[in-house]
Amino acid sequence: MTEHTKIIYLMGTKISLYVKGNNSEILLNKAEDMLIYYNEVFSANREDSQLSMLKKRAAFAPQKVDEELYELIKIGKKHSLCEGSFLNITIGPLIKLWRIGFTEAHVPEQEEIENVLELLNPDNIQLDDEAKTVYFLKDGMEIDLGGIAKGYFADKVMDFFQKEGAVSAKVDLGGNVLVFGESPSHEDEWNVGIQNPFLPRGNAAAIVKVKDQSVVTSGIYERVLDQEGSKYNHIFDSKTGYPIKSDIASLTIIADTSLDCDIYTTKLFGYDAISIIHMVNERKDMGAIVITKDGHLACTDNLMGKIYPFQKTDS
């Protein structure tokens, strides 16, 4: 039995994979091939990806896509249509209008925003489960899976590791962390850092101990537009067309799957900190950590005793 780690630069981020088991190097190489394939199919930035193809053709005729892309679009549509959800997979045209995180970022005119809002209705994605086709009822629509794709990929890679007999593994897709088995330091739980939203990436505010779970953090620190004294973050409210306004700087969700973490960090981000903690406390299968803009940290009841101030660790 061997253990190996592989670092991959893909999808605009640093990916770290760790596996302990038989043929661990072979498993890591196959996992890299999986991620390369996902990038080719799901990328919004590649003109030749299936996702980009939908933008060009799906308003004119139903487009057949790979089963996994179809599955994620279907999941994303379902959660986008939930009452009170801030997740919306049709938000692509709004993101491209603002361009936050790019050199041409700007605050659009109100008329431009209103024109785009007409394209942000997930109900206008028509799916055919038997044919695995996607059809847009409005020209100009665009699906953006950036908020949930990494979680989906992490789950698929971890599922592959487990089916191939790995006894422990870690998948870190640029902050989407999913762990299984004991940590390399032979502890039952893994120490996962929670990003400090007020410091550069890589600086943790706290450490949370988890076992066989995923940890995902979403925050307003990633990309910001500062224009005429006003700051605009990159997380949008598809009802107003403007960045979400709330008292939270970051939201961390802990759950059994990385996809659930991705979904709920976005679905809940528009709520205030107290409401988020109350809502997640109602669930037995999920935990939440909120850091507010004034620097306070709060967590759900099930994480009490599992969160510690940051200190350097090897696990």
Image (cartoon, rainbow, N blue to C red):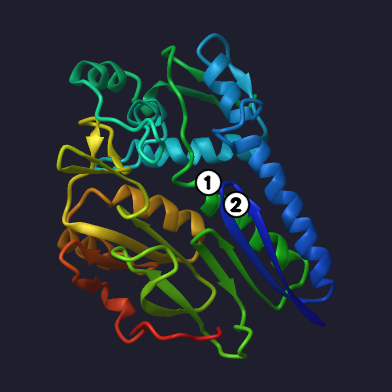
**Foreground pick, 46 / 299:** 46
Which element carries disc 2, helix, strand or loop? helix
In the rendered image, the vertical position of residue 25 relative to residue 129, given as above or below: below
Distance between the Cα atoms at labels 2 and 1? Answer: 6 Å
Query: Which of the 4 image quarters holds residue 83?
Result: top left
Q: In which quarter of the image is the C terminus?
A: bottom right
Q: Name the residue under label 2.
A: 153
Q: Can residue 134 be seen in this view?
A: no
Q: Residue at x 29, y 39 (%)?
A: 236
Q: Are marks 2 and 1 in contact (CB under 8 Å)?
A: yes
- Residue most extreme to the top: 60
Amino acid marked by disc 2 = Phe
User: In the image, 3: left or right of 237?
Assistant: right
Q: Can residue 301 be seen in this view?
A: yes
Which element carries disc 1, helix, strand or loop? helix
User: In the image, 8: left or right of 302?
Assistant: right
